[in-house]
Amino acid sequence: MAATFWPMPSLCFFLSLSLFCMREYVTERKQR
């Protein structure tokens, strides 16, 4: 059960994290 349950939340977390980093990077580039 854990093997099938683990990848889904981690994938969502990774996607949201990358999206957040991209947005932060873009906003920083625009300000400077």
Image (cartoon, rainbow, N blue to C red):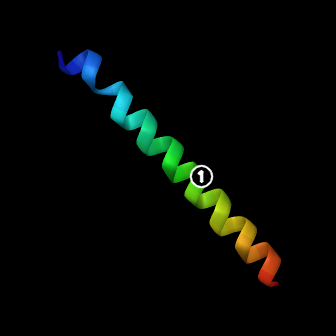
Left or right: residue 14 versus residue 26 is left
Left or right: residue 12 versus residue 23 is left
Q: Residue at x 36, y 26 (%)?
A: 7
Choose between 12 and 25: the one closer to the eye.
Answer: 12
Above or below, 30 relative to 14: below
Above or below, 8 relative to 20: above
Furthest residue toward left? 1
Q: Position of residue 22 (x, y in %)?
A: 66, 57
Indicate the amino acid at tag 1.
Answer: Leu
Q: Residue at x 34, y 35 (%)?
A: 9
Q: Position of residue 3 (x, y in %)?
A: 25, 17
Residue pointed to by mark 1: 19
The quarter of the image holding the C terminus is: bottom right
Left or right: residue 10 versus residue 5 is right
Q: Residue at x 26, y 23 (%)?
A: 5
Furthest residue toward bottom? 32
Above or below, 9 relative to 21: above
Q: Position of residue 25 (x, y in %)?
A: 69, 66
Quadrant for residue 11, please give it: top left
